[in-house]
Every structure is written in structure tokens, then in C-alpha cells.
Amino acid sequence: MMNLRFVRMTDRYLGISLCHLLYFLEKVMKAVFGEKEEKEEKEVEKILMMKFWGIGNLVMILPTIGAVRRHYPKAQIDMFTLLTNREVLQHNRWINNIHFLDSRNFFIFAVSYLRNVFRLRRERYDMVLDFEQFAKTSSVFALLVRGRERIGFDTPGQGRGIAYTRRVAYLDYKHMVETFFRIAKGAGVEEADLSPVRLDVNDQERENVRSFLTNNSIGEKDIIVGVHIGSGDNMMTQRRWAKENFAQLADILINKHNAKIIFTGAGEGEARLVEETLSLMKNGAVNAANKFTIKELAAFTEKCRFFISNDTAPVHIASAMGTPVVAFFGPNTPYLYGPRGNNDLIFYKDLYCSPCITNYNAKIASCDNPVCVKSITVGEVFEGIRKKYLK
């Protein structure tokens, strides 16, 4: 994957210039070649939705995708997202076609980006719905694809609103599920059920999870606790509760309640983190790092009494599957990005400096001492879990 900071800085400084340049060229072309704005409302036949970064964000957008489909039942609805997000949207009943942006390195990203521009421009979309909150990469793409209507967030301080024919005011006081739905409102959708939407998990994926549990001597009657100690690339270490804390909490749950602890993770970095955490424990636990696909992770969370996680995508996956979530927040705020279940347990100190990563600053912060997460103690977490889930 490309270096996230490099991507953000390139997007920030090059993206705004490209947005303004393409907007100006569009106006010139219309003036020179006599293109007229269409005054009559045409039937919406083709819609392109875009969201690149954030598996958790995509999970939160699912209710809005369903609302758009119900409002435009006959339309062709396509999605453009990162290749790494493939599993979240595969076999989705509301989407006709999914187009992928490959971001393995800068060269592949550029080639994939341009290839998709030419491919999707030929589709002549009636609407382009851009769910990115601050990235200009998608704003530029919306301009290049030239949808008849382009709808996206005019996030203050990000200079991206110029790309859209309908600018949606970004609100930093509503949960992101509701904020994402504002894009659909810009597309004419008035109402929607914004309850979490379960991921489409098939029988084979559930059977794979059952086999994994059986092979690790875990039965249906056991207290199964999933634990995800990693986090996304953005402010990776600052968003993480310490591995020593996870190890201590896991030992307490095993000693006091005979819980079966299963650590999840994806990628080499998180696999190492799980190994390091297991080495700090006095009891045995199961290492499931890199053992589950995204859909299998969703199926696994269904088996859990509760799921413990840092602020990252599995929070939203578990919540969508109806599993209670124990989540740690600090640099991000749970008021915008927390799980949406009815029985969750959130630890957030709401310090004077939190949140320090927002969509206003493009999720870029320089904090090197995340006291917001460090100040969450093992004792208070266990006590909260005991009272809520282990009475």
C-alpha cells in the first residue's frame, strides 16, 4: 500500500489545484462549444457512488446505498472503491457493478485511476455521489467523469466543494451514518431506515468459522470474546490501547469467567502485534490473525458474547452483525464514529484535546502522546464489561 501521509499531502496540495483547473476548463468548454445547462428534470438512469478509504466507512454507508436503491429502483447503481474493499460490497443486492481502484503503489494507482476515468466516463452517469469527506482524489474523479449531477461534501477547509453541482454541507455534530445519508438527500432521497445493515455472509463463510472454532476446542456454549488490537493506517499507534492492557484484560476474563479469547488481525503488522500480546499473557488464547476474510470476520463476530476493539473497521463490522462492541476512542470521537448497537460499551475520556483527527483537518494530526487512550485503565474496562455482559 502507498504511504498514507504521502497520499494525504499529495491530495491536499495537488487536489485543490486540479479541482479548480478542471472546474474552469469545464466552464470554458461549455462557453466555447455552446453546451447548455439542462433545465428539464431527466429520469435518473445511471448512478455512480464513490468511497475509497475506510472499510468501516463503507459499512456505515450501506444503509444509504439501500435508501438510494429504493428511491431509484430501476436505475443502474455502480460503485467505485479501493480494491482492498472488495469483500464489503461483493454480492450486494443494491449494486449493479463495482469498479476498483488499485492502490498497491503510486504507479499502479495512477494507471488504475486513469483507466477508470476513461471507462466510467463512457457510462455517462446521471448522478455521481461522492461519499469522501475530505479527499480531493474523488472530487477530481467526479469532474473527469462528468456526471450530469455531481453531489459531494463541501467540507470547510478542504476546498473540494467547487467540484460539485450540488454541494452538501458537511456536519461535524451528527454520526457519520446520518452525515453520509445527507449525500442521498442531495440526490432527492427524503427518508431512510439508517439501522445497521448486516454484511452478506454465506453458508460457506459461516462453516469456515465454525470449523476454526471447533479446531481450537471452542464450543457454542463457551463465552467467546473477540479482541482486535490493531487499527487503521491513520494515526495507527495513537489510536491503540496498549498491548499490555489487552493482555492483562484477556487474562482477567479467562481467570474470572473462563472466557475463550480470540485475537483477530489483518496484515503482517497486526499479526506481529497479536504474537507480542500473546507472549505477555499468563493464559492461553487463540491467534486468529490473518485467518479470517472480512466476511468470515463478520461471521465470527456473530459468535461472540461481545467484541473488544480499538477504533477501527471491526467495530463497525461487529456492530452491523448485531454483536455488542467494547470500543476505545481518543483521537477520533465515538459521537461521530462509534458503533450503532443498543448494547455497546464505549471508553472515551473526551479530553480538552480530543478529537485531534477530524474531517476538517483531513485526519492529519501531530500528537505523539495520546493521553486520551493511555488514560483508559484495565480496571475500569473490566468492571464495565463485568456489569454489562457477565452478570
Image: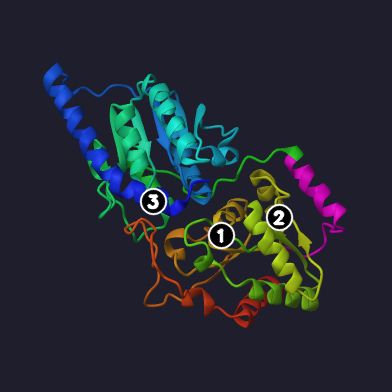
Tell me which amino acid carries mark 1: Ser
Task: Give whichever of discs 3 and 1 has the lower sequence position.
Answer: 3
Mark 3 and mark 2 lie on one chain; the one further toward the N terminus is: 3
Residue at (60, 61) in percent of width and height: 230
Pair 3/1: label in front: 3
- CB within 8 Å, label 3 to label 2: no
Which element carries disc 1, helix, strand or loop? loop
Q: Earlier in the sequence, mark 1 or mark 2?
A: 1
Name the residue that disc number 1 marks.
231
Does the segment drawn in magenta span residue 214?
Answer: yes
| Mark drawn on residue 97 | none
| C-alpha distance separating marks 3 and 1 | 18 Å
Query: Does 233 sit left or right of 245 as displayed?
Result: left
Residue plotted at (60% across, 43% down):
199
In this figure, which residue is indicated by the disc labeled 3?
Answer: 8
- The answer to whether residue 368 is visible is yes
- Circle 2 packing at 10 Å, graded few (<14), some (14-19), many (20+), is many
Where residue 352 appears, as percent x and y from the top left, is: 37, 77
| Amino acid type, callout 3 | Arg
Q: Which residue is mark 2?
A: 289
Question: Which residue is found at the position 57% from the left and 34% from the top?
Answer: 92
Residue that lies at the very extreme toward the top in this rendered image: 33
User: Hey, what amino acid is under mark 2?
Assistant: Ala
Q: Secondary structure at mark 3?
A: helix
Tell me the quarter of the picture where residue 119 sits.
Answer: top left
Q: Please give the range of residues in magenta.
A: 205-226
Residue 5 coordinates in the image, percent (x, y): 42, 54
Q: Name the one closer to the observer, 50 or 303.
A: 50
* Disc 2, SS: loop
Q: Nearer the viewer, residue 274 or 187?
A: 274
| Comparing labels 3 and 2, the label whose residue is closer to the camera | 3
Residue 72 vertical placement versus 251 (above, below):
above
